[in-house]
Amino acid sequence: TPKLELLCQYYVGEIVTSMTRASLVAGGAESLIYVTATGKIGALLPFMSREDVDFYTHLEGSLRDEVPRPTGRDPQAYRSYYAPARHIVDGDLCDAFNALPHDKQTKIAEQLDRTAGEISKKLEDVRNSLL
């Protein structure tokens, strides 16, 4: 009998009602597109290199301390609500980099040995690869 192997897990925050593997851009990489009960559309994108995994993991870690939390909850605790988040980078948290004041962007960029512009460009490239 075939068995499934748990590769990653992540709390979306809502009930996922549909999921499909698709490419929304002609010639683009495939991703998992999901829809929730309230109509939210989300995507799970695979990273193409280990360098990207390291970059986004460090960016996410830096942003956990800098991004304002409307509910006061730690983003990692929220994404691990039912089970620990595993092998997933929180794209919503990474996307919050562009909403930070310039001085905080510069501080985070220095921690990653990049400029704030390079980080914003990298985030935009990922978004454009999906849409």
Image: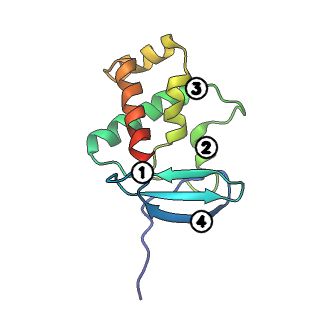
Q: Around disc 2, counting alpha carbons within 10 Å, would you say few (fewer than 14), some (14 to 19), or many (20 or more)?
A: few
Determine whether, in the image, residue 77 is placed left or right of residue 7: right
Disc 4, disc 2: CB below 8 Å?
A: no
The percent position of residue 20, horizontal first and vertical second, equals: 50, 65
Return the residue nearer the eye: 67 or 119. 119
* Residue named by callout 1: 45
Q: Nearer the N terminus, badge 1 or badge 2? A: 1
Disc 1, disc 4: CB below 8 Å?
A: no
| Secondary structure category for the residue under label 1 | loop
Residue at the location (54% across, 39% down)? 92
- The answer to whether residue 85 is seen in the rendering is no
Residue furthest bottom as drawn: 1
* Residue named by callout 4: 18
Disc 1, disc 2: CB below 8 Å?
A: no
Q: Which mark is residue 59?
A: none
* Residue named by callout 2: 77
Q: Nearer the viewer, mark 3 or mark 1?
A: 1
Q: CA distance from mark 2 to mark 3?
A: 14 Å
Q: Nearer the N terminus, badge 4 or badge 3? A: 4
Q: Quadrant of the C terminus?
A: top left
Q: Nearer the viewer, mark 4 or mark 3?
A: 4
Determine whether, in the image, residue 118 is placed left or right of residue 22: left
The percent position of residue 63, horizontal first and vertical second, equals: 50, 28
Give the vertical position of 20 relative to 24 (above or below).
Answer: below
* Residue named by callout 3: 67
- The answer to whether residue 126 is seen in the rendering is yes
| Residue 17 sits in quarter | bottom right
| Secondary structure category for the residue under label 3 | loop
